[in-house]
Amino acid sequence: MFTLKFKQAKTFKVKVSTMDAEMEFSCEVKWKGKDLFDLVCRTIGLRETWFFGLRYTVKDTYAWLKPDKQVLDQEVPKDSPITFHFLAKFFPEKVEDELVQEITQHLFFLQVKKQILDEEIFCSPEASVLLASYAVQAKYGDYDPNFHKPGFLAQDELLPKRVLMQYQMTPDMWEEKITAWYAEHRNITRDEAEMEYLKIAQDLEMYGVSYFSITQNKRDTELLLGVDAQGLHIYSPNNKLSPNKSFPWRHLTIKRQTLNDNIGYYIFKFYSSQLRVNKLILQLCIGNHDLFMRRRKVDSIEVQQMKAQAKEEKARKKVERQILAREKQMREEAERAKEEMEHRLFQLQDEARMANEALLRSEETADLLAEKAQIAEEEAKLLAHKAAEAEHERQRLEVTALKTKEEKRLMEQKMREAEQLAVKLVEQSERRLKEADHLKQDLNEAKDAERRAKQKLLEITKSTYPLIAAYSSPPPSTGPENPDRTVDMASSIRMDFKDSDMKRLSMEIERERLEYMEKSKHLQDQLKELKSEIESLKLEEQHQAGLYSLRSYTEPPYIPHSNVRNTPA
C-alpha cells in the first residue's frame, strides 16, 4: 500500500490597484494583512500609512483588510489573483497641515476628484468649475494660448454629469469657463494645484463621510449614519448634506462595554442590516477617533522628521523654482533680444536689398534715358520730313477740295433739276390719273347711255311696230296662220340698231383704254430713269465725301519745320 501526498502551494497572487497604477505581488500563505499593506506602501514610497488601507468587495458590500489577521483567513475573494484597492480609509481634518508627502497629497487628490466626478460628493456648479481649473493646472501646467488651443480639454472628464445636465451649455462653453479660471493659476506647481483642490474639497458637506443605513430599532424608519474625521452624524435618508444630529469625537469614548458603563453616559443605539456592516462601522469609528486624539497630541518623532524633510523639500523646490523662473525669464529675455536682433537684421537686409535695387533701377533709368534721347532725335528728323510731305499733301488736298466743291455744286444743281423733273413727273402722273378717272367716268356714262339707248330702242320698237306692219308689204296671209313673220321683222330691226351702236361705242372705249395704257407705261419708264439717276448721283456724292474724310484723317497734321525740337521721351 502507498499514499500520494500533494504539495500545498506556499504563495498566492495579489493584484493591488491604486488611483493611478496597478501592481501584482506574490505573497506567502502565512502573510497577515499588515505584511501585504507594508509591501504596497514600500513599493509606492508612502510613509503616511495611517490614512490608507486595502479594500475588497464582499458580496454586496465592501470591507477593509485587517492588519493583524492572515490574508487568506479573511473573507477575501477566492479569485486568482486576489484584487485589492489601495484607498484612503481616513481623511484629515485640515489637508494643508496633515498631508506631508507629495505622494499622499496626490493619492488623496485622485480619490477625491473621482468621488466628485462620480457624484459621491455633492459639489455646486461654481465650485466644480473652480476645482476643474486646478485639476487642469495640475495636469497641463501653466496656460499657454499658443499651445492650449480650443478643444484641448475635449478628452478630459472634469465636471460631474449632474452639473453638465443642469445647464444648457455646450462642451465648448464649459471649456471656455474652465480655461478662464485656468489662466489665473499661472506659476502654480502640480503639488500646489492639487493641494488647492483638496483645500476647496474639504469644505464640501459630503467630503470624507462614509454613509451606512441604520435603524434605531428593528421597526423604526431607516436613517443614515455618517462617519468622518469630526465625529458621528445622523442623517435623513434623502438628505446627506445636513445632519439631524452630530456626535463629535471629543465627546465620545470608545471602549468595551461593561455592566456599569451606562452610568453617566448618553446611550445611542442603532441597528444595521448585517453584522459585517457593524464591524465596518466599528473599524471606521475606532480609526477616526484614534486619529482625532492623535492630532491633539505632540507629533511623533517620525512625523516630525517627515514634516522637517517635507519643509526642507518644499524650500529646496521653492529655490529651484525661483532659479528656474529666473533662468526662464533670462531665457525669455534672451529670446526676445534675439528676436529683436533678428528682426533688426532682417530690416537691415531689406534696406540693403532695396538700396541695391534702387541703384540698379537708377542705372537702368540712365541707360533708358540715353536711348530715349537718341530715339527722340531720330523721331524729330522723321517728323520734320513728314511735316514737309504733309504740307505738300495739304496743298494737293486744297486743290482737290476746290474741285470737290465745284463737283458738289454741279451735283446739287443736277439734284435740284432731278427734283424738279420728279415734281413735274409726279404732276403729270397725277394728271394722267385724273384723266384715267375721267375716262372711267366717261366709260360708265357711255355704258349708262348704252343702257338707256337700248331701253329707248326697245320702247321705239314697241311703238313703231304697228306702223311697220302697216307700211310694209302685206303678208301672203294675214290670218293667224303666219304670226312668226311679223315677230322676225321687229327683231331684225332691233338687232340691227343694237349691233351698230354697240360696235361704235366699244371701239371708242378700246381706243381710249389703249392710249391710257401707253401714257401710263411711258410715265412709269420716266419715273424709273429719274430714280436711277438720283441713286447714282447720291452714290457719287457719298463716294466723294468718304474719300475726302479718309484723306483728312489718315494724313499727319502739318508741323512747321521751324518748331520741331529734340526733347527726351
Image (cartoon, rainbow, N blue to C red):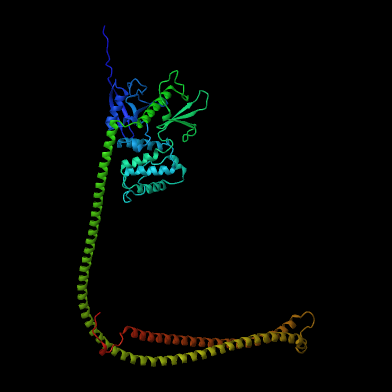
| Residue under the point 47% across and 42% down | 166
The image shows residue 354, relative to residue 268, as above or below, that is: below
In the image, residue 109 lies at what x, y percent? 35, 37
15 left or right of 348? right
> In the orientation shown, which residue stands out farthest toward the top?
1
Q: How many discs appear?
A: 0
| Res. 137 in view | yes
- Give me the residue at 38% from left, 47% from top: 181
Q: Provide residue 476's location: percent of width, then percent of height.
A: 76, 84
Residue 467 image offset from top left, x and y in percent: 77, 88
Quadrant of the drawing holding the N terminus: top left
Residue furthest toward the right? 479
Q: Nearer the viewer, residue 541 or 493?
A: 541
**Residue 224, relative to residue 137: is it above or below?**
above
Q: Is residue 400 left or right of residue 322?
A: right
Find residue 336 and report its image quarter. Answer: bottom left
Q: Nearer the viewer, residue 432 or 393?
A: 393
> Considering only vertical position in the picture, is 7 above or below 44?
above
The quarter of the picture where the C terminus appears is: bottom left
Please name whichever residue, 68 or 82, is drawn nearer the observer in this view of the structure: 68
Residue 430 is situated, as x and y percent measured from the top left of the image, at 56, 88
- Residue 24 seen from this side: no
Q: Is residue 82 above or below residue 449?
A: above
Q: Is residue 420 left or right of residue 156?
A: right
Quarter-wise, where is residue 95 in the image?
top left
